[in-house]
């Protein structure tokens, strides 16, 4: 191959990427700024751009170039390998199938909103069934007909299989359930309702200081307000969102730190490789590991608060006057079971994921019929969380993922937690005094390490391989269990 061919491939991949970032930006704007009566125009703009992006992605020239390219170095080999993977994924499904899927997604989403409001799973069931049929059909179009759930997982976390997850999650559950039970039996309780009347402007100021100190580059990103926090964008322009509640400042703070972790990852991807797989993230599990590591391992630590607590109190002297330091730290590390995944603390969170993984696994294998989903959900919820929802809205209908046909996504959250803990253990060995930095408000050493080990690798390695490379060990839940024990044991199991 000539280097001209390689450049030609790269410029075509960049077209796909830039169109994708434009779609993302309009989507961000829709949730942050869009005037209420402009939604129809936005839908048209998004549909057109998505169509153009799809056309760019299925460009036969990309296929022809990939067929003939012989990479001359390791970087090119990664680009060719991953571009081929992406190209297969977009070209092996007919346009009519893609259109049908998009139409159904939109209809199913609205059906889910209505069903959730009435807590009526039966009304949503036919839509979910069609989502499942589409997912099975897509897997078979891509050559994964005998392993459709693996395909669903692989879409988010390349190289991860349901067999692998079954083993990891089984081990995690065995270690986690006794810890959860022990904490439930503990007389220690985090203080409730102690945070009242935190003005939003002041919260915003504190948030900005925290996220800047963590290393978020506001010259290549920003944070705004939306109903549900998210992080959008890649490399050169990162848009994060948060939401504010005067009576729950920790919700805004921790969700923002979470999104900052996503943003730091995207900002750390090599800009010079922008638009190629070397400038893209290594999948949802790795992404989630970055958000969780900053949110949990870092921001729930004593050392983090050794620096930030006096500053937080400085901004909110009245509001925090009656809260002792011990109470404050316990509130930051509150553990209490809840039916709702997104409200869950980090100890229970993984159990919510194990539940959803088990449901998806059974659905895809045919062991579980869609109509029997609520009953299966409630049994698992009782087994794992010790709670049974009294209505589907609080149970099987709570998440948006299945409403939009997104299967195989939930495991990424738990993978992310495991990866974060394993990385945390490794970086702690590399820099045993790392947390003394945090107590001084300095996070540069941690960020620098994550940059070289994870961010700058782009899609060079799949998640499990990346973990092996960086930590010298296969992914294992034992570090997550060890971390949770060390964080929550001293607080709740004294
Ligand atoms: Zn996240």
Image: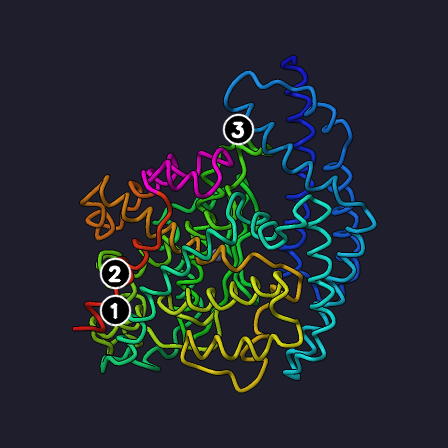
Which of the labelled discs sits on residue 388, or is there none?
A: none
Tally of marks: 3
- Residue at x 33%, y 52% (from the top left corner): 421
Examine the structure image and report whether residue 468 is included in the region drawn in magenta.
yes
For mark 3, what is the residue? 272
N-term mark: 1 or 3: 3
The secondary structure making up most of the magenta span is helix
Q: Is residue 91 left or right of residue 185?
A: right
Front-most of residues 208 and 485: 485
Q: Position of residue 298 (x, y in %)?
A: 31, 55
Q: Which residues are magenta?
A: 447-473
For mark 1, what is the residue? 329
Q: Secondary structure at mark 1?
A: helix
Residue furthest right as drawn: 96
How far apart marks 2 and 1 lie (CA) works out to: 8 Å
Whether the residue carrying mark 1 lies under 8 Å from ligand 1 is answered with no
Residue furthest left as drawn: 494
For mark 2, what is the residue? 305
Q: In the picture, which quadrant includes the C terminus?
A: bottom left
């Amino acid at each position: 191959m000539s280097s001209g061919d390689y450049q030609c491939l790269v410029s075509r991949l960049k077209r796909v990427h830039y169109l994708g970032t434009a779609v993302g930006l309009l989507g961000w704007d829709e949730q942050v700024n869009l005037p209420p009566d402009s939604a129809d125009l936005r839908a048209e703009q998004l549909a057109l751009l998505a169509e153009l992006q799809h056309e760019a992605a299925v460009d036969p020239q990309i296929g022809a170039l990939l067929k003939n390219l012989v990479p001359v170095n390791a970087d090119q080999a990664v680009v060719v390998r991953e571009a081929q993977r992406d190209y297969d994924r977009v070209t092996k499904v007919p346009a009519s199938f893609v259109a049908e899927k998009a139409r159904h997604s939109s209809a199913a989403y609205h059906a889910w909103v209505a069903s959730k409001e009435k807590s009526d799973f039966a009304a949503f069931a036919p839509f979910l069934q069609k989502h499942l049929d589409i997912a099975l059909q897509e897997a078979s179009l891509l050559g994964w007909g005998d392993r459709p759930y693996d395909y669903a997982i692989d879409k988010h976390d390349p190289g991860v299989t349901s067999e692998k997850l079954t083993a990891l999650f089984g081990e995690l559950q065995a270690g986690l359930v006794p810890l959860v039970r022990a904490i439930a039996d503990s007389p220690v309780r985090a203080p409730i309702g102690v945070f009242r009347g935190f003005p939003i402007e002041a919260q915003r100021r504190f948030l900005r200081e925290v996220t800047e100190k963590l290393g978020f580059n506001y010259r290549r990103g920003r944070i705004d307000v939306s109903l549900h926090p998210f992080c959008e964008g890649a490399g050169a322009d990162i848009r994060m969102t948060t939401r504010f509640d005067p009576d729950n400042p920790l919700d805004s703070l921790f969700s923002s730190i979470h999104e900052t972790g996503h943003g730091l990852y995207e900002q750390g991807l090599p800009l010079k490789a922008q638009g190629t797989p070397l400038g893209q993230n290594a999948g949802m599990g790795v992404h989630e590991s970055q958000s969780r590591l900053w949110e949990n391992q870092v921001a729930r630590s004593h050392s983090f608060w050794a620096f930030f607590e006096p500053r937080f109190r400085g901004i909110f002297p009245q509001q925090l006057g009656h809260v002792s330091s011990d109470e404050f730290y316990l509130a930051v590390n509150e553990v209490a079971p809840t039916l709702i995944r997104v409200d869950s603390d980090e100890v229970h969170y993984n159990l919510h994921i194990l539940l959803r993984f088990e449901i998806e696994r059974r659905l895809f294998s045919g062991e579980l019929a869609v109509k029997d989903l609520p009953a299966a959900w409630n049994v698992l919820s009782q087994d794992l969380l010790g709670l049974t929802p009294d209505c589907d809205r609080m149970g099987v209908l709570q998440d948006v993922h299945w409403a939009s046909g997104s299967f195989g996504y939930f495991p990424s959250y738990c993978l992310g937690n495991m990866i974060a803990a394993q990385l945390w253990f490794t970086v702690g060995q590399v820099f045993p005094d790392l947390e003394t930095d945090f107590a001084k408000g300095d996070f540069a050493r941690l960020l620098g390490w994550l940059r070289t080990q994870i961010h700058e690798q782009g899609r060079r390695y799949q998640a499990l391989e990346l973990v092996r490379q960086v930590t010298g060990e296969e992914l294992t839940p034992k570090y997550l269990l060890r971390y949770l024990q060390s964080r929550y044991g001293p607080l709740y199991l004294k």
